[in-house]
C-alpha cells in the first residue's frame, strides 16, 4: 500500500515530462543541454524524457546550431501539428471564436457582433458552437483533434464540474455554461474570467513576459484587472482577478451599473466615455451604431484635433484612469501595469503619456519609479488567446499525457 502523499514512479515521470515539455514550449530551453542546466536532471534522464516526447509527437527536432566551438546542439521545439485548441471571448460587444494550433498560432477567426446588453445563455451557446463548427469546416481540422476549448467570460467562473458562470453584466446567475457547451461539442471545456485570460495571454506571449508581478487591465465596456505573480508556467505562477472597475474614485459620483456610485468604470468604461462625450455641450451625434464603432469614430475625431468635446472627454478619462493606475501601484506594488482590452487598444496610444503623468502625481514616488506603465501587445484577440492557454496549460501540467 502506498502511503498517503507519497510519490509513485508514475508521478515522478509525469513531473519530469511536465517540466521539460513546459520549458521547451515556453521557449526557456532550446536543446537537451539547456534542459539539463534548467532542470538539474541528468543528461541521461533528459534524453530519455525528450525521446518520449518526440515519440508522442509533442516535440520535434528542428535542426541544429553551433555551440561555442563545441559539438552542434540539436534544437527542440513544440510540434504545432500535435493538436489544436479553440479560444472563445464572450464579451459585452462581441463573441469571438478563434482556432489555434496548440502552439497558439492563429489558424482562423470568426466574430459575431453584439448589439444588446443581456444575452440569453442558449443564444451564446449556439453562437459558440456555430463558430467552432465553421472554423473546423474552413480549415479541415477534425473535431477529434481538439485538445479543448477555453472560454473567457465577463464574470465569475466557478471551479465546479458544471462550468457555472455568474455574469451580472450579461444578466446571468448560476448559468451551467460548461455543461451546455460540452453537450453540444463533446470536448473538454475550460472557463475563466476574461480579465484573467487576457492577463495570461499577455504574461505568456505579450507585454508581461518578463514581469515579476504584473497587473493587466482589461479596458472595455467593463474594467477589470488580472494580477499575475511569476508569469511563466514553469515558475508555477499564479494569477487572480480584481474588480478594479468598481473601486470608488469619487464619493457620491456618477451612478455605476453595479448599483454603486463613483466607480472607476463609470468614468472610463466604453459606454461611460461615449455618454460623457454626448453630454458635453459641444458633443455631436455619432454616424455609426454600436459601442466599438462609435469608440473608433471618437478616436478619429480626436486625431483631427478640432473637436472640443472629444478633447475634454479624453482629458477626463486620462485623469480618472491615471488615478486608478496610481491606486493599483500604491496597493499592489507591481513592476508593470499593462493597459489592454479593445478600448486600451484604441485609446491607449493617445492617452498613455497623460495617464502616466497623472499616475505619477497620485502614486507614492518610490513605488511609481519601480513600475512600468505600458500597453498590451496582443490586440483585440488577446482574451481569446488567453482562453486558449487554458487547455494548453492542462496538457503541459500533465506532461502531455491526458487521461482518456
Image: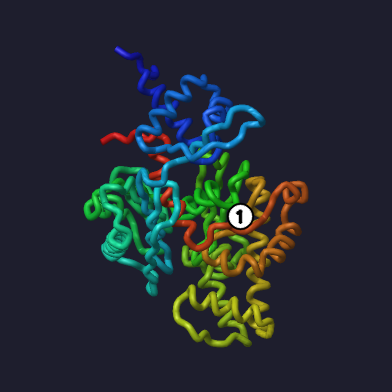
As displayed, is residue 80 above or below residue 295?
Answer: above
Q: Position of residue 99 (x, y in %)?
A: 37, 56
Left or right of residue 357: residue 257: left
* Quadrant, the N terminus: top left
Q: Position of residue 101 (x, y in %)?
A: 39, 50
Left or right of residue 131: residue 245: right
Report if residue 194 is visible in the image: yes
Residue in the picture at 54% in, 54% down: 225
* Quadrant, the C terminus: top left
Residue in the picture at 43% in, 58% down: 154
The residue sitting at the left extreme is 183
Left or right of residue 385: residue 345: right
Q: Nearer the viewer, residue 157 or 56?
A: 56
Report if residue 246 is visible in the image: no
What's the image's color scheme? rainbow
Residue 90: quadrant of the picture: bottom left
Q: Position of residue 240 (x, y in %)?
A: 50, 45
Amino acid at each position: 500500500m502506498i502511503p498517503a502523499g507519497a510519490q509513485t514512479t508514475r508521478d515522478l515521470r509525469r513531473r519530469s515530462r511536465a517540466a521539460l515539455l513546459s520549458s521547451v514550449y515556453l521557449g526557456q530551453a532550446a536543446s537537451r543541454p539547456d534542459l539539463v542546466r534548467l532542470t538539474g536532471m541528468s543528461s541521461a534522464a533528459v534524453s530519455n524524457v525528450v525521446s518520449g516526447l518526440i515519440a508522442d509527437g509533442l516535440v520535434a527536432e528542428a535542426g541544429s546550431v553551433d555551440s561555442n566551438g563545441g559539438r552542434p546542439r540539436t534544437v527542440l521545439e513544440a510540434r504545432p501539428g500535435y493538436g489544436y485548441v479553440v479560444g472563445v471571448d464572450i464579451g459585452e460587444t462581441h463573441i469571438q471564436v478563434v482556432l489555434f494550433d496548440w502552439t497558439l498560432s492563429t489558424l482562423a477567426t470568426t466574430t459575431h457582433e453584439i448589439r444588446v446588453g443581456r444575452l440569453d445563455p442558449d443564444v451564446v451557446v449556439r453562437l459558440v458552437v456555430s463558430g467552432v463548427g465553421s472554423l473546423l469546416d474552413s480549415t479541415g481540422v477534425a473535431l477529434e483533434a481538439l485538445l479543448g476549448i477555453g472560454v473567457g467570460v465577463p464574470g465569475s467562473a466557478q471551479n465546479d464540474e458544471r462550468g457555472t458562470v455568474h455574469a451580472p453584466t450579461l444578466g446571468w446567475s448560476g448559468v451551467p455554461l460548461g455543461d451546455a457547451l460540452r453537450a453540444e461539442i463533446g470536448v473538454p471545456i475550460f472557463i475563466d474570467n476574461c480579465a484573467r485570460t487576457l492577463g495570461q495571454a499577455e504574461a505568456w506571449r505579450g507585454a508581461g513576459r518578463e514581469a515579476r508581478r504584473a497587473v493587466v487591465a482589461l479596458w472595455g465596456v467593463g474594467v477589470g484587472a488580472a494580477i499575475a505573480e511569476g508569469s511563466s508556467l514553469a515558475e508555477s505562477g499564479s494569477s487572480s482577478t480584481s474588480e478594479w472597475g468598481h473601486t470608488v474614485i469619487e464619493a457620491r459620483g456618477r451612478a455605476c451599473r453595479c448599483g454603486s456610485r463613483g466607480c472607476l468604470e463609470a468614468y472610463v468604461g466604453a459606454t461611460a466615455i461615449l455618454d460623457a462625450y454626448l453630454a458635453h455641450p459641444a458633443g455631436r451625434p455619432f454616424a455609426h451604431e454600436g459601442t466599438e464603432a462609435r469608440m473608433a469614430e471618437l478616436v478619429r475625431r480626436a486625431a483631427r484635433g478640432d473637436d472640443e468635446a472629444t478633447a475634454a472627454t479624453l482629458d477626463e478619462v486620462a485623469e480618472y484612469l491615471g488615478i486608478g493606475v496610481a491606486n493599483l501601484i500604491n496597493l499592489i506594488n507591481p513592476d508593470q501595469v499593462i493597459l489592454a482590452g479593445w478600448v486600451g487598444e484604441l485609446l491607449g496610444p493617445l492617452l498613455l503619456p497623460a495617464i502616466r503623468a497623472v499616475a505619477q502625481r497620485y502614486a507614492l514616488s518610490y513605488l511609481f519609479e519601480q513600475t512600468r506603465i505600458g500597453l498590451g501587445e496582443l490586440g483585440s484577440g488577446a482574451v481569446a488567446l488567453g482562453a486558449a492557454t487554458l487547455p494548453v496549460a492542462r496538457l503541459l501540467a500533465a506532461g502531455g499525457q491526458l487521461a482518456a
